[in-house]
Image (spheres, helix red, strand yellow):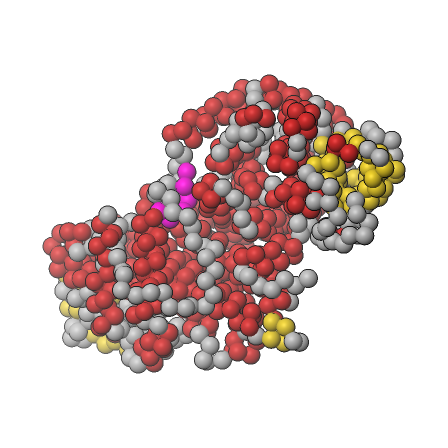
Amino acid sequence: MRLLGFMYRSYTIPPAGTPLGYHETLPVTAMDLNLTPQEQQFRDEVRAWFTANVPKDWPQMRTNPNVQERFRYLREWQKKAFAGKWVGIHWPKEYGGRGASTMEQVIFIEEMARAEAPPFANTLGLGLIGPTIIAFGNDAQKSRYLSKILSGEEIWCQGFSEPNAGSDLAALRTEGRLDGDHFVVNGQKVWNSYGWAADWCELVVRTDPQSEKHKGLTVLLVDMKSPGVDVRPLKQITGESEFNEIFFRDVRVPVENVVGKVGEGWSVAIGTLMHERGTFGAGLQVSYRRSLNRLIELSHQVERNGAPASQDPVLRQKLAQSYIEIELMRLNQMRAFSRISHSGVPGAEGSIQKIWWSELNQRFQQVAQEVLGPYGLLESGAEDAFDGGLWAYGYLRTRGNTIEAGTSEIQRNIIGERVLGLPKSY
Amino acid sequence: MQFGLSESQNILKTNARKFFAAECPMTEVRRLMEEGDGYHAGLWSKMAEQGYLGVIFPEEYGGLGLGMVELAVLLEEMGTALAPGPYFSSVILAGTLLEAAGSDGVKKRYLKPLCEGKLRATAALLEGAANWTFDAVKMQVTGDLLSGTKMFVTDAAAADFIIVPAMRDGELTLWIVNAKASGLAITPMPALDLTRKLYKLTFDCVEASDLLASGAAARGALERMADIGAMALSAETTGGMQRVMDIAVAYVKTRKQFGKPVGIYQAVQHQCADMLVFTESSRSASYYAAYALQESTADAQAAVSVAKAYTSDAGREVGNRGIQVHGGMGFTWENDVHLYYRRAKANEIALGDATYHRERIARLVVDRASRPAQA
């Protein structure tokens, strides 16, 4: 406590601008970016499991244009991981998880990325819908749905956005009309990832037709095999169809499938969206670093002005800038995770992370195009493409990054209002 | 794994904030800026009492023996306050050179009084070519007599002694020169940063007081100083960014146009949100650079350059936005934002700008990678 020797006590803080308080990190015992012995042990255990179990043929399957075949493969992989109790580790123990801490989740996600493991098939079920059912569902719902989410036996999608309710989600109009012991659902949802593969859907509907905005909404769990559900693929800018539109025509949903209370669906939906940020970026940081390392490798091979591109002074600047941005993504995340593991709640830093990874990825893909020149244009199927055409694909795919999971504009609104305390603009 | 300030680091930070807010409010910063060399004896001795002048130096030489993260948080608060005085020159430049290269006798004679606030110093790094790499030193020493010109030297008028790199028989050497030595002329170079002044030093057969180091030891000390200095500037710029953002956000909440506070408009909100992203990322980068230097991690050099390159750009960008959202008020002398904007620009240039540090990263990261196996 040598420090106390010069503690400054004689003054009070004078008013200086607006106290934001955001950067006040919660005190930790000591700044230490190494893993604790326990964390190390967990890391070793996770690493050993991935080393022994990651399927060797994933690099080929990854670019398989047959999405059904690829999805079956991911389902099998999830089943294998489920058998080892490595799916949904952040879920509480009583629901089949491991009750993993924030840091353990981060380690797990990073190791998964480091091992170049395939993702689990039931991405939304594990990350968003399962935790929502745990938080808001009743006991019958928990025992009916949770273990099948973990095993991948039932795949889930989300029915939130509509053609006229995107960023302004509370404007949604899909109706749920009570008819005896059922809700009858009519309307259209859009941008549904995995809609074509899903067995179930977490659906937000308006159950009070007189209501406006956040009131009168209800969350329903809808069996996608119900009569009147029509899933249509949306062909994307990349040519593939990750997303769908879902049409509901007189779809009957039993009242016991309401999550939370009728008319209080907004708080359930917001609870789900909160899970959308959090530890999600941990794996991205690892895969971005790997992509940058790969691009640096290729920069020694592709030439520019008679010398390897790696020697071009302008491209060197751009590669170094990508290194800086990816490194800052890692550091910002570490600070955020440290905060969350002390405070227990993900805060508005989620918006900073979202802006950061999405915009950096777009800039990085542009740097890749500049380094690779015409090779960057080659798509999957071109014999001479690097990495199965991933660079051309990545260039287009990243345009979606600043739109999905809350646009950059919405994230900046959130920072303005919730962190900086600016008046709400809408 | 924990990436955040410890309780004692938070206490240091809070106390430093209180200290500078009370001891040198902006009225005092402006007064010192307009009068002379920016050094104020009263403030300096109070900073010595707090231990700030020797924060990272060993206790046996009058320091506190704390680490780089403590230095970073202190610099952050000094950046927020735009604290006047030769702290960067005396403690960061001269102090780290003395600590890295000085003998026990030299440390007792120079570093100890520096920590105690009895002596102040600077380092004369640049010459006419304005090259930050240490291969560029041209000044010659014959015996112990220095002749030539050093430029862009910070706070030289407030210094009691100056550390001078020079070449002796083709070898890099570091000399301690009394600022009052005969044959040494110190002339101001009026420049953009009004709160950290620059000087030109002309040496005409100036007798050095002591040889600090030569050869590899001199080079090693300069490189260590440059890394700690770049980290310190990054932290200081981060503190300035925080203040500019605070001032700007407070302003847009009260300034009304079209009947509403301008902060309600998304065009303004998004500028402010960007300021937060820049500031928080700069803070992450600076703290990590400090941690990496403290722990001598394998990526310490890259970590320093990441911080310096990023904060060099981000500090300027926050200033640009801070001025813009003020409208006409942002363009006035009376608004404090321009004082921070000036410091951010000077910090951007000092010890290498973003381009310089990106090239350093390229050497560390791009050149060390090899061609792909299948090529």
User: What's the residue at 58%, 40% (across, down)?
Assistant: A280
Q: Which residues are magenta?
A: B1-6
Q: How many marks?
A: 0
Task: Work out whether B184 lies above or below A365.
Answer: below
Q: Which is more toward the observer, A399 or B361?
A: A399
Q: Quadrant of the C terminus of chain A?
A: bottom right
Image position of B4 (left or right of B91): right
Residue A369: x and y, percent? 64, 48
Magenta stretch secondary structure, dominant = loop
Task: Work out whether A123 lies above or below B91.
Answer: above
Residue B349 seen: no
Residue A387: x and y, percent? 64, 35
User: What's the residue at 82%, 44% (across, down)?
Assistant: A175
User: What's the residue at 27%, 64% (across, down)?
Assistant: A10
Q: Which is more toward the observer, B247 or B85?
A: B247
Residue B25 seen: yes
Task: Work out whether A270 lies above or below B271.
Answer: above
Residue A204: x and y, percent? 74, 42
Is residue B215 in the magenta section? no
Residue sitting farthest toward the front:
A180
Is residue B4 in the magenta section? yes
Image quarter of residue B119: bottom left
